[in-house]
Amino acid sequence: MPRKKLLRSRLKSLSQGKALRERLVWPLLAFVAFYLFGILGYYFIGLMTESPLASLRHSIYQSAIVLTSVGLQDILNSNDTWVGSIFTVILSFLGLSVMVYALSTITAFIVGGELRDFLEARRMEKRIEDMQDHFLICGGGETGQYVAEEMLATDQPFVLIEIDPDRATKLREIGDFCYLVADASDDTVLQDAGIERARGLISALSADKDNLLTVITARQMNPGLRIVSRCVQMENERKLRKAGANAVVSPNMIGGRRMANVLTRPGVVTFMDELMRDNSAIRFENVRIAPGHALENKTLAEANFHAIADVNIIATREPGQTNYQYNPRGNLILTAGITLIAIGLPAEITKLREYLS
């Protein structure tokens, strides 16, 4: 599908609102204009024929019965003149044409699904406006689909942006989530997706140039946003990081390493596959102890995370450090900002995240 035809195509609340105006408002305005034209015409014709009923009230009535084709009673004696007869014929044909066009437009709007799409767009717009601390997924291809499935499995709020309407509709089959059909590199689209309130963004577009543009735009709009970008060619990794990506992932590199691990360490790969493929399987999660939280300055043993959620803390990282401490001991002090790596079922991970939020 050509890119120009897809830019901003059917953008939620923008394109649907424009369609509503063009398909419904303009026919209505045309009908009102012809109605006013008929009122003024019959009023002046009544004055010309010196009809005793020549008044604005009777002109309104005469114009209404002609335009709606409910009757042709000539209460103003307008047909006594050539001007009145010709005016009635013209107004009748024009009024009938406008009404047929308006009815066909409204019918097509309802039957064709545009009304449903418009209502869905307004509902989606409201949901996105209420979202806070969510994620943006730019691109609904194979990579974007797997990202969306993982987000749904771990109960993470997100908005998916996909430029292809057909692909976006197909993605809706995997679950209920917010989405926009638009160009993810457009700053207006990112603003509609709530990038100022977002916690992170994944650029999973098929071309590095598109990912680069999306990363630059997102970084300018939200300097504190965590951005992860897909990289098709590894020579572009440096450019993506320089543009503002916090992390760059190459599916080709990961695929190659995975193939080697399947060959040399099949047991480990099988275990990790169960984690990633089974939505009910255990998940890893990183959480932080916020300043002022009840667990701040307590030991890991005193925190008793098992009483909060059925999770295990398998690693920690102190603020400002790059290395993790694996299998931490119970006397570890939970300072403000410390990162904890937890493992547990998705529901338990959600409990932990809510407790520490």
Image (tube, rainbow, N blue to C red):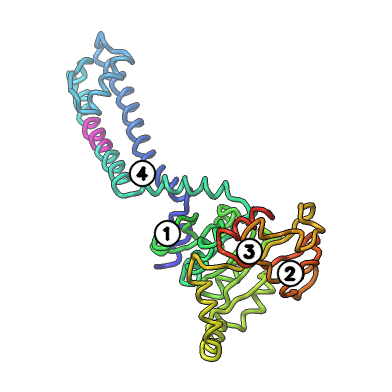
Query: Which residue type carries mark 3?
Result: Val
Mark nearer the viewer, 1 or 2: 2
Label 4 neighbourhood size at 10 Å, few (<14), some (14-19), many (20+)?
A: some
Q: Which residue is mark 2?
A: 316
Q: Which residue is mark 4?
A: 23
**Label 1 to label 2: alpha-carbon separation:** 37 Å
Q: Quadrant of residue 227?
A: bottom right
**Callout 1: SS:** helix
Check if residue 127 falls in the magenta segment: no
**Label 3 to label 2: alpha-carbon separation:** 14 Å
Upstream in sequence: badge 1 or badge 2: 1
Q: Residue 148, how many percent across, how many down?
A: 50, 64
Q: Which residues are magenta?
A: 90-99
Mark nearer the viewer, 3 or 2: 3
Q: Residue 287, how many percent across, how many down?
A: 68, 62
Which image quarter is the C terminus in?
A: bottom right
Q: Which residue is mark 3?
A: 311
- Camera-side residue: 296 or 155? 296
Query: Which residue type carries mark 1?
Result: Arg
- Camera-side residue: 346 or 138? 346
Upstream in sequence: badge 4 or badge 3: 4
Query: Which residue type carries mark 4?
Result: Arg
